[in-house]
Image (cartoon, helix red, strand yellow):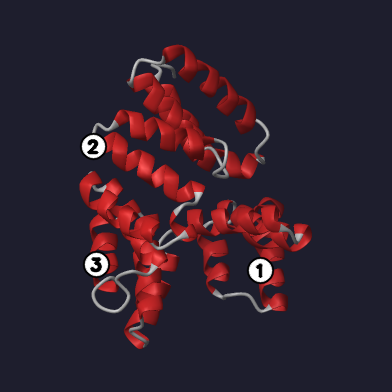
Amino acid sequence: MLGIILFYLPSLLCGVHVVRTGREMYWLWLFIIGPLVAPAFYVLAVIVPEMVRGRTGRTVGKVARQALDPERDYRNAMRALEDTPTIGNRMKVAQAAAALGRWDDAEAQWALCADGAWADDPAILMGHALTLLELGRPAGALEKLEKLKALGPEGKTPTVALAFARAYEGLGRNDEADDAYRFAADRVPGLESGGRYVAFMAKTGRREDAEIGFAEIERRLQKIAPPLRAEARVWRDLAAKALGRS
């Protein structure tokens, strides 16, 4: 009996917190079917962010919630679009589909967003371009990016430069890709730009430069908070694969 009580104690304590703070009741069901895993996720998703009250805490919570219910944002976005079919809600569906790797669905939504008066909206052009890149359609992505660049400052940011670099690389325009990657590498937050640039240099025969860049990625990875490191490690692994490392 004591063993059973101890086994369910984390669920019980977290359940009390759910009720007292008015959280979503689905947590209680999760505590029942996953008396060890669900409380651990709840601590990361809810309690730790409450204690930290900062950007890192909110990010940790978001990561935990996505791991527990990865389709939650997509369902909510679809429900909102069905209730109120606005461009803003359709953009949220496209973004949620992209987050799940449903690139065909995301591209279809972006295309609908761009049909009409919103064709030159910077956020729509960028979202559509990134989705086309994931679908292996760099020419279409470059067309969107050129339109974005022509709009002014919002089309000349480091994030846009990274997208240009990927499009140029996909089209074999390596000199232009290198310039864009170099500009973005130290300016875009996170490890994506550096990881992609290292992979590009490795693929184009610049092994020594790629190794230097990879060492910097390894150094920066160790400074990232452990709960967020798995997401950042994706870009380290992309660079490592291009260099033939594990």
Residue 65 point in image, percent of width and height? 54, 59
Mark sitting on residue 171: 2
Asked if one can make out residue 39 in the rendered structure from this viewpoint, the answer is no
**In the rendered view, does 2 fall on the left or right side of 73?**
right
Query: Tag 3, which secondary structure?
Result: helix
Of circles 2 and 1, which is in front? 2
Q: Residues within 10 Å of mark 2 (few under 14, many from 20)?
A: some
In the rendered structure, which disc, 2 or 1, sits on the residue that comes first in sequence? 1
Q: Amino acid at mark 3?
A: Ala
Is residue 207 visible from the viewing direction of this image? yes
Front residue of 230 and 137 = 137
* Kind of residue at badge 1: Gly
Q: Which residue in the structure is indicated by mark 1?
A: 15
Indicate the quadrant containing the N terminus: top left, top right, bottom left or bottom right: bottom right
Distance between mark 2 and mark 3 Cα atoms? 22 Å
- First of labels 2, 3 by sequence position: 3
Disc 3 target residue: 111
Quarter where residue 242 is shown: top left
Left or right relative to 172: residue 101: right
CA gap between label 2 and label 1 equals: 54 Å
| Amino acid type at image mark 2 | Leu
- Tell me which residue sits at (68%, 50%) in the image: 3
Task: Locate residue 38 relative to residue 110 in the image: left or right.
Answer: right
Q: Residue at x 43, y 56 (%)?
A: 155
